[in-house]
Amino acid sequence: METRWEHFPHGADIGIRGIGRSKDEAFEQAALAMTQVITDAKRVAVREAVNITCQAPDDEILLVDWLNALVYEMATRHMLFSRFNVHVDDHHLDGTAFGEHIDRQRHQPAVEVKAATYTGLSVGQNPDGLWEAQCVVDV
């Protein structure tokens, strides 16, 4: 099975889920799912790299910290990201987000993600052995 991302319904907010063969891939796909809430990631060129490091007491909080670090970088750098490299080891994440500065005409952002939340938060392996990382993002 390929890595992938999904959205799931949640009232006024949007649930995101990253699925991969490893925890790293699931975190990467969750970040991609968050980008897809904002715009079509295929429209976002890989022009710049931004390094992000996070540490948390568990993988669930690490996921929220990772996604909120991306929200912060998008807001302060006026960027969108379309590719991610993540390595998670013992609740420590080293990641790189690749993207470009926002071009409102080309990217046509639909909404602004304000934050990743603890709602619907989970990180773990499903019965098929794939890793899933999910939460609800506030839009």
Image: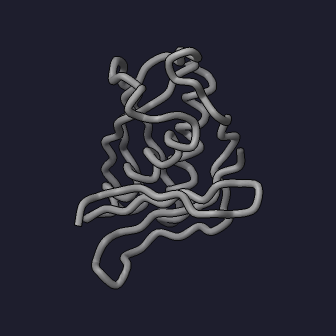
Give the residue displayed 49% in from the left and 16% down from the top.
Answer: 101
Give the residue displayed 55% in from the left and 29% down from the top.
Answer: 73
Q: Does residue 72 appear to the left or right of 48 in the view shown? A: right
Give the x, y percent position of residue 27.
40, 54
Give the x, y percent position of residue 54.
48, 46
State the image quarter where residue 104 is shown.
top right
State the image quarter where residue 97 is shown.
top left
Give the residue displayed 53% in from the left and 37% down from the top.
Answer: 70
Residue at the extreme bottom: 127
Q: How is the image coloured?
A: one colour
Q: Is residue 119 above or below residue 124?
A: above
Give the residue displayed 42% in from the left and 58% down from the top.
Answer: 18
Quarter of the C terminus within the rendering: top right
Q: Is residue 107 above or below residue 25?
A: above
State the image quarter where residue 5 is shown.
bottom left
Quarter of the N terminus within the rendering: bottom left
Q: Does residue 37 appear to the left or right of 3 in the view shown? A: right
Give the x, y percent position of residue 105.
56, 15
- 110 or 13: which is nearer to us? 110
